[in-house]
Amino acid sequence: MATPIRIAVTGAAGQIGYSLVFRIASGEVFGPDQPVIMHLIEIPPAMGALDGIEMELDDCAYPTLAGVVKASSDDLEAGFADCNFVVCVGSIPRKAGMERGDLIRINGPIFTSTGKAIQAAAAKDVRVLVVGNPCNTNCLIAMSNAPDVPSDRWFAMTRLDENRAVAQLAQKSGQPVAAVTGMAIWGNHSATQFPDFFNTKIGGKSAVEVIGDDEWLKNDFIATVQQRGAAVIKARGASSAASAANAALGTLKSIVTPTPAGTVFSAAICSDGSYGIDEGLITSFPLTTDGNKWSVVQGLEHNEFAQAKIDATVAELQSERDTVKDLLA
Ligand code: NAX
């Protein structure tokens, strides 16, 4: 029997958590022969809800689930103890009238303590995925407060944006989603993100040629992807949850599995300076991995339109970094 992998999920009793923890426990990420121990973390008032989730996990009788650890956000070190993966979902959602800068200042402090506790208690091989918004900058704060954890172990989630973009292109072209390859999100998980359709293929051909409508791609497509979260809230009365959990699962699978030839995946990582983007900024890029070490896909060309989009989203990330300067160690 393999040694269990320990995986912590903060905000485990929230909407995304409720979908995510069951799918991880079921073996969907690490496979049917790899036991997992779930570490569920919540704020003190939600600990009762975690008891219910633990009961339901028991009642799934997953052969892959080797244990459950519950911890309160007041004792993050207990929550992260020996964890190989930490998925940071827990944060305060944006409320009506709140500016993005307010949200950054409210959630930022959660991530200073998260970073410190990860450094103090997690396993030496820990990898961290930040989902809670603003996820790029929250990830930057946590990483900077855990200087002993190598910078290539930190990820912020832009996979939901990638999946949304792939689905839109598949629908517009009338082809299956599997025909869409090379789609990557650049920059911030926000309304400035750039889904790079210029370097995307549909059925092996340039997406621009297959779609044959530059105006749709430059305007409707980008806007639909950027505004999809708001559209889901409007329709459902609640923010994306099942699709967000699915994207978190997809990100975890992509970072532990060698990337199939001819494909890429998106995640925000600590920029290595590729494409002139500030080293150290948590920025979404097209990535590949051998299952252990990721690399940014090199040699992609950006025309003036694409470069302007990338510059704008990077400028937003730089300004978010300035907003939280005092939280960076
Ligand atoms: P919910 O409000 O349903 O759940 C959040 C949970 O986190 C709650 O149960 C709350 O008690 C808990 N929590 C709050 N502070 C905590 C702390 N300090 N430690 C541990 N737990 C804490 O929100 P949900 O819909 O699950 O969304 C969670 C986060 O994901 C939000 O920040 C949201 O903006 C973000 N999202 C990120 C996406 C992405 O693509 N990166 C997409 C979906 C989602 O909007």
Image (spheres, grey):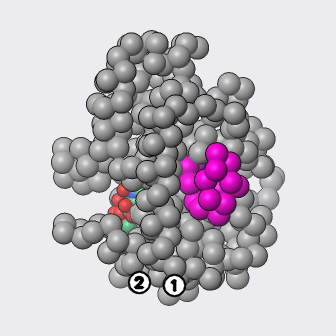
Which residue is at a point 34% across and 44% down the rendered structure image? 226
Is 257 situated above or below 112? above
Q: Position of residue 285 (x, y in %)?
A: 59, 45
Q: Which mark is residue 312?
A: none
Q: Position of residue 264 (x, y in %)?
A: 63, 34
* Residue with the mark numbered 2: 44
Is label 1 in a helix, a strand or a loop?
Answer: helix
**Residue, far bottom:** 74
The picture quadrant for ligand 1 comes to: bottom left
Q: Magenta region: which residues?
A: 267-284
Q: Residues within 10 Å of mark 1 (few under 14, many from 20)?
A: few
Q: Amino acid at mark 1?
A: Asp
Which residue is at a point 64% across and 50% down the rendered structure image? 276
Q: Of 172 and 313, which appears nearest the observer?
A: 313
Question: Is 269 in the magenta?
Answer: yes
Q: Is residue 222 left or right of residue 181?
A: left
Which residue is at a point 64% across and 29% down the rendered structure image? 263
Q: Quadrant of residue 210?
A: top left
Q: Position of residue 175 (x, y in %)?
A: 43, 14
Q: Which mark is residue 326?
A: 1
The quarter of the rendered structure image containing the C terminus is bottom right
Q: Amino acid at mark 2?
A: Pro
Q: Is residue 117 visible?
A: no
Q: Of 119 and 83, which appears nearest the observer?
A: 119
Q: Position of residue 303 (x, y in %)?
A: 52, 31
Q: Of 21 and 221, which appears nearest the observer?
A: 221
Separation of residues labelled 2 and 1 (CA atoms): 27 Å
Is 125 situated above or below 257? below
Is 175 situated above or below 259? above
Q: Is residue 242 left or right of residue 87?
A: left
Is label 2 in a helix, a strand or a loop?
Answer: helix
